[in-house]
């Protein structure tokens, strides 16, 4: 089965939104996921909500390439977050992500669950329990792989998650097993930051290698895969 893939911004965080769209188009992705807020202090910030020229360029690249926006990130909620502070981010997402389509697709605007394979595996969540959940909750999944051994420290967990994930099939996560518990036709958002490899070959090439590895591992029957 052929899947639709999305290029998550964390995979190539130092590409601006227009550059990310171009990289996605060149790699054969159907979608991109755009990060509109800064997660860590050293992260780049792409102010689509306030930079009109950046928004125009991003929309022009989307129109030219045919790539679509699957999701936007990231809204952190804690007791000190005023909800109105997120208005500009949500309005920007609505302008890029066809909010009316989303609203018509679900019964309630907050009825959804995102499975990130890394965090699912690291939390030792159960595939059997996942299978019992309503299929309508799942609209897409964050796909990656990682070493089978779980880091013993918080710092190690964060480093893997933000800088050194692996392509599907390279690590110890049961990628196929987890995805088999989800609807078969949802897009797979490849969120695979690889800082060491990116420093050598660039983020665009990492994005291309990510979708190549995903297709090889998830779409080609295992018996047909030749040893590398």
Image (cartoon, grey):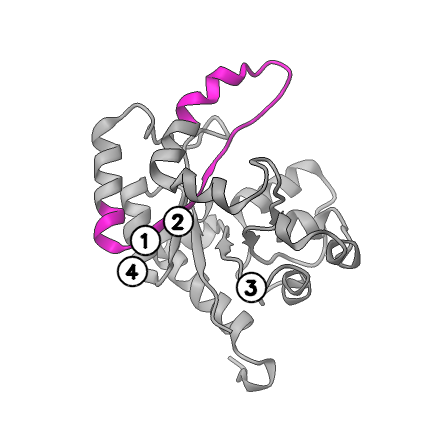
The residue under label 3 is 168
User: CA gap, disc 2 to disc 3?
Assistant: 18 Å
Please give the label number shown on residue 26.
4
Dot 3 or dot 1, earlier in sequence:
1
The residue under label 2 is 32
Name the spot of residue 223 as percent of width and height, x first. Answer: 60, 85
Please give the label number shown on residue 67.
1
Badge 4 marks a residue whose secondary structure is helix
User: CA gap, disc 2 to disc 4?
Assistant: 12 Å
Badge 1 marks a residue whose secondary structure is loop
Dot 2 or dot 4, earlier in sequence:
4
Which residue is nearer to you in this view: 94 or 67? 94
The residue segment tinted magenta is: 61-89
User: CA gap, disc 1 to disc 2?
Assistant: 7 Å
Q: Is residue 86 magenta?
A: yes
The reply to whether discs 4 and 1 touch (Cβ–Cβ < 8 Å) is no
Q: Is residue 73 magenta?
A: yes
Report crowding for label 1: few under 14, some 14 to 19, many 20 or more residues within 10 A (C-alpha). many
């Amino acid at each position: 089965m052929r899947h639709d893939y999305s290029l998550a911004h964390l995979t190539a965080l130092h590409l601006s939104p227009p550059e990310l769209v171009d990289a996605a188009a060149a790699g054969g992705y159907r979608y991109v996921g755009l990060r509109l807020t800064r997660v860590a202090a050293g992260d780049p910030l792409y102010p689509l909500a306030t930079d009109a020229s950046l928004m125009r360029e991003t929309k022009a690249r989307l129109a030219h390439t045919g790539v679509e926006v699957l999701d936007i990130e990231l809204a952190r909620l804690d007791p000190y977050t005023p909800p109105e502070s997120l208005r500009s981010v949500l309005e920007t997402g609505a302008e890029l992500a066809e909010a009316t389509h989303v609203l018509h697709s679900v019964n309630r605007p907050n009825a959804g669950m995102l499975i990130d394979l890394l965090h699912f595996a690291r939390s030792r969540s159960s595939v059997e329990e996942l299978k019992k959940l309503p299929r309508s909750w799942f609209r897409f999944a964050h796909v990656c792989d990682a070493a089978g051994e779980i880091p013993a420290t918080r710092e190690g967990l964060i480093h893997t998650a933000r800088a050194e994930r692996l392509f599907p099939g390279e690590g110890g996560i049961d990628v196929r097993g987890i995805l088999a518990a989800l609807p078969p036709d949802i897009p797979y958002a490849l969120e695979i930051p690889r800082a060491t490899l990116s420093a050598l070959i660039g983020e665009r090439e990492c994005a291309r290698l990510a979708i190549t590895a995903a297709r090889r591992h998830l779409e080609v029957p295992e018996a047909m895969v030749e040893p590398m």
